[in-house]
Amino acid sequence: MSSGGASPSDWLLEVNNLACGYNGATVVNNIHFALGHGDIGCLLGPSGCGKSTILRALAGFLPLTAGEVRLQSRAISLPGRTVAPEQRKIGMVFQDYALFPHLTVAGNISFGLRHSSRAQRQRKVAELLDLVHLKDLAQSYPHELSGGQQQRVALARALAPEPTLILLDEPFSNLDADLRRRLSLDVREILKSLGISALLVTHDQQEAFAMCDQIAVLRAGSIQQWDEPYNLYHEPVNRFVAGFIGQGGFIPGKALGPDAIESELGIIRGNRAYKWPAGTQVDVLIRPDDIVFDAESSLKPKVVEKTFAGTSTLYRFKLSNDTEFEALFRSHLDFQLGETVPVRVEADHLIAFERG
Ligand code: ADP
C-alpha cells in the first residue's frame, strides 16, 4: 500500500501490519504504511477511528499486539518489545500545547536540552525562536501568548532535541479556522526547511491537504487508502474514501463500457478503465465542481438547497427522485430555490463503484 519510488531501506518510518488497542480489545488492525525521509504524512479520519491510538503506538506509549514499527530500519516496537518513548528520538506536539506554565518560552524550548552545555542550549533556543518567529517572546510565559504562539513554542520544544520524526496530534484543533490554515502552512514550511519528517493526526481534510505529502484515510481502525492528496481526491479506492474526501455525492448509473456510464445526467466518460461488464449497475461520484452552468443544456434540474459562501454558492439540485447532486457556482450566478437551471456535467474523471 506504500507509494512507490523508494526501496524499503530508504524509508524513515515503516509500519507493518500493526495492531494494538486497550485492555485486550483491538482498536486498530493491519496498519501498514511507510514514510520517506523529509516527508509529512497524515492519519486522517473521523473521530474515534483510531488515529491517536496509532500515534501512541508510534511514540512508544502503547505496546503492539501484532506487527512492527521501524524507524531508520531499527525495530522500535514489536509485540512484547517496546523501546521506551524517550529512547526513540521522536518529538510530539499535542492539541493542548502541554507547555510548562511556570517556564518561560525559552525555558520551555530548552527543556529537552538539559544534557547540553549552556552555550549550546542558548544557541539552539535562539535558532528555534527565529525559526518559529517568536524572537521577541523568549521571556514571556505561556499564559501571555495566543493559542497560535503557544503551538509554535510547542513545535520549537519538540524540535529542540533534533528528533528523527515529529508526531503532531490534532495540533491546530484549538485554533480558529483562519489561524489554523496559516499555521498549518507555516509548520509545513518549518518542517520542510529542516528536512524533518512528521506524521500529523487530524480529522480536518483541508489541514491534511494543505500540510501533508501522503495521507492515510482511516475508518474504524483500518487504513482505507494511503496516497497523495491528489490521488485521494481523483482516484479514491472505495466509496468511503470517495465520500469522505472532498464534497460530492453519488447518482445511479449503468455501465456502457469500461470508461463510460449512462446516467440521468447523460453519458459520463472518464480516463480510467473499469473491469465491469456493460450493463452493470453503478453509483457515480459527482463533485460540485463537475457541474457547470450551460444555457444551451436541455438538462434542467431544480434548486432544492442553496448555501451562499461568499465568492461561490453551493447548490443542491434535484433531477428526479433518484438523482440529486451538488454544484458550486460563482456567486454572480444567482438562482432561487425551486428554479430550474440548465447544467451539464464536465468531469475529467469517472469515479464509480458497483452498486452493492
Ligand atoms: P481518534 O484519534 O481517531 O479520534 P482514538 O485513537 O482516540 O480515535 O480512539 C479509538 C478508539 O479507541 C475509540 O473507540 C476510543 O473509545 C478507544 N480508546 C481510546 N483511548 C482509550 C483508552 N485509553 N482506553 C480504552 N479505550 C480507548
Image: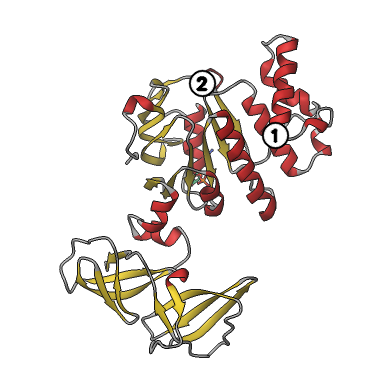
* Residue sitting farthest toward the left: 277
Q: Which residue is mark 2?
A: 88
Is any atom of residue 223 visible in this view? no
Q: Which residue is mark 1?
A: 132
Image quadrant in which the C terminus is located: bottom left
> Of the residues shown, which amino acid type is indicated by label 1?
Val
- Judged from the image, the secondary structure of the residue bearing numbered disc 1 is loop
Mark 2–mark 1 Cα distance, whole angstroms, equals 24 Å
> Of the residues shown, which amino acid type is indicated by label 2?
Arg
Residue 2, percent from left and from top: 34, 39
Residue 299, percent from left and from top: 39, 87
Task: Report the number of discs.
Answer: 2
Query: Upstream in the sequence, badge 2 or badge 1?
Result: 2
Q: Mark 1 Cα within 10 Å, few/some/many (few <14, many 20+)? A: some
- Judged from the image, the secondary structure of the residue bearing numbered disc 2 is loop
* Residue sitting farthest toward the front: 296
Residue at disc 1, CB closer than 8 Å to ligand 1: no
Is residue 213 found left or right of 278 in the rendered image? right
Q: Mark 2 Cα within 10 Å, few/some/many (few <14, many 20+)? A: some
Colour basis: secondary structure
Residue 207, percent from left and from top: 56, 50
Q: Nearer the viewer, mark 2 or mark 1?
A: 1
Residue 306, percent from left and from top: 57, 79
Is residue 341 found left or right of 356 in the rendered image? right
Dot label at residue 346? none
x 47%, y 74%: residue: 326
